[in-house]
Image (tube, rainbow, N blue to C red):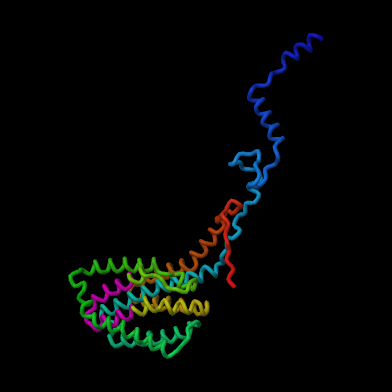
């Protein structure tokens, strides 16, 4: 053996313990059988083993629904309706408070609204079977409610006599904001068949009672509270029926309420009317566009690691 070969053998590095361990692990893994997704066989893998094929079955946004601008804008009409009704109610109050709305005119408006609204409800509610007993029960309910309100009018008129106007205005704004926030918009959009918004309804009625206590006659209090009962307790039923009946009627009703409210607000404060206009435009156009732009960031991950969902088939 030559001297050169001897030196080359001496220069060959020896394997470190870490390298030997890694090589042994590699050979062991090569001898292992491929991992299988089964539980009834003991495999050469730990229980918390994550195989390379784990993410092959991952699905992104499989059930995510892309909503169109028309669909989102139509759903926003219920918010516009509710906001218009609240502001319209407040404008009617200030006309009553300042004696610019004669009591006779208010009674006529109330009577027309309740008769016309009830006839529209009977027409648009397709699932309702119109019978004499049904109409009689409805009329009996109206009579009981209005009689109770009329009997309490004198008490309600003096309910907040010792409270300042500033406190009344602030509390009323707070209550109507709660009403708007907790309203059952799913029902108004026809997504469900049962109206359930007790907190919103109570806030609106309480705010109406507080405002009514500032009017100057018992009968005016009665008419004003009857009006509040129509717009806050009965109008959701009518608007729900209209939405289920036709989207075109829903848009038409929204436009009429907005136009009427905007026209009445202009008589009080032009700046507030402009703010109301732009806010409604944002609700019906800006918000849907913003939501559509944000849909691309939606990430819903599904895979075999999710719990199984049992679908019930109704026959």
- 81 or 53: nearer the eye? 53
- 19 or 204: nearer the eye? 19
Q: Position of residue 54 (x, y in %)?
A: 63, 46
**Depicted 50 relative to depicted 230: above or below:** above
Q: Position of residue 73 (x, y in %)?
A: 51, 69
State the image quarter where residue 311 is shown: bottom right
**Depicted 176 relative to depicted 50: above or below:** below
Q: Main secondary structure of the magenta part?
A: helix
The C terminus lies in which quarter of the figure?
bottom right
The N terminus lies in which quarter of the figure?
top right
- 265 or 79: nearer the eye? 79
Locate residue 239 relative to residue 163 in the image: left or right: right
Query: Is 218 part of what is drawn in magenta?
Result: yes
Locate residue 75 relative to residue 14 in the image: left or right: left
Find the residue positioned furthest to the right.
1
Q: Which residues are magenta?
A: 203-228
State the image quarter where residue 199 is shown: bottom left
Q: What residue is at 59 percent from the left and 68 percent from the top?
A: 313
Q: Position of residue 46 (x, y in %)?
A: 61, 39
Q: What residue is at 57 percent from the left and 53 percent from the top?
A: 306
| Residue 271 can be seen, yes or no | no
Find the residue positioned furthest to the left.
162
**Depicted 123 relative to depicted 310: above or below:** below
Q: How many marks?
A: 0
Find the residue positioned furthest to the bottom.
132
State the image quarter where residue 168 is shown: bottom left
Query: Is 217 part of what is drawn in magenta?
Result: yes
- 85 or 114: nearer the eye? 114
Q: Position of residue 294 (x, y in %)?
A: 53, 58
| Residue 141 can be seen, yes or no | yes
**Depicted 39 relative to depicted 8: above or below:** below
Locate residue 268 relative to residue 239 in the image: left or right: left
């Amino acid at each position: 053996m030559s001297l050169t070969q001897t030196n080359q053998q001496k220069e060959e590095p020896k394997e470190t313990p870490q390298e030997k361990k890694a090589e042994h692990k590699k050979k062991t893994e090569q001898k292992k059988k491929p991992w299988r997704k089964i539980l009834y066989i003991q495999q050469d893998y730990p229980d918390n083993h994550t195989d390379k094929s784990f993410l092959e079955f991952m699905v992104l946004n499989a059930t995510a629904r892309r909503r169109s601008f028309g669909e989102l804008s139509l759903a926003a009409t219920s918010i516009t309706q509710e906001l218009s009704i609240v502001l319209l109610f407040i404008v009617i109050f200030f006309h009553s408070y300042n004696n610019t709305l004669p009591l006779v005119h208010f009674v006529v408006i109330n009577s027309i609204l309740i008769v016309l609204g009830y006839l529209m409800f009977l027409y648009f509610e397709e699932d309702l079977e119109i019978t004499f007993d049904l109409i009689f029960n409805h009329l009996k309910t109206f009579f009981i409610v209005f009689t109770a309100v009329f009997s309490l009018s004198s008490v309600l008129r003096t309910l907040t006599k010792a409270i300042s106007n500033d406190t009344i205005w602030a509390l009323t704004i707070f209550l109507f904001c709660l009403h708007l926030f907790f309203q059952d918009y799913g029902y108004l959009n026809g997504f469900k068949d049962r109206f359930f918004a007790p907190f919103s309804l109570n806030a609106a009625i309480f705010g109406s009672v507080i405002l009514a206590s500032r009017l100057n006659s018992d009968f005016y209090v009665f008419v004003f509270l009857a009006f509040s009962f129509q717009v806050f307790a009965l109008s959701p039923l009518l608007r729900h029926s209209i939405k289920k009946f036709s989207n075109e009627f829903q848009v038409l009703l929204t436009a009429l309420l907005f136009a009427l409210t905007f026209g009445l607000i202009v008589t009080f404060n032009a700046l507030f009317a402009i703010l109301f206009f732009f806010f409604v435009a944002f609700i019906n156009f800006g918000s849907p566009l913003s939501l559509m732009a944000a849909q691309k960031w939606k990430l819903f991950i599904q895979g075999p690691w999710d719990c199984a969902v049992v679908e019930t088939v109704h026959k």
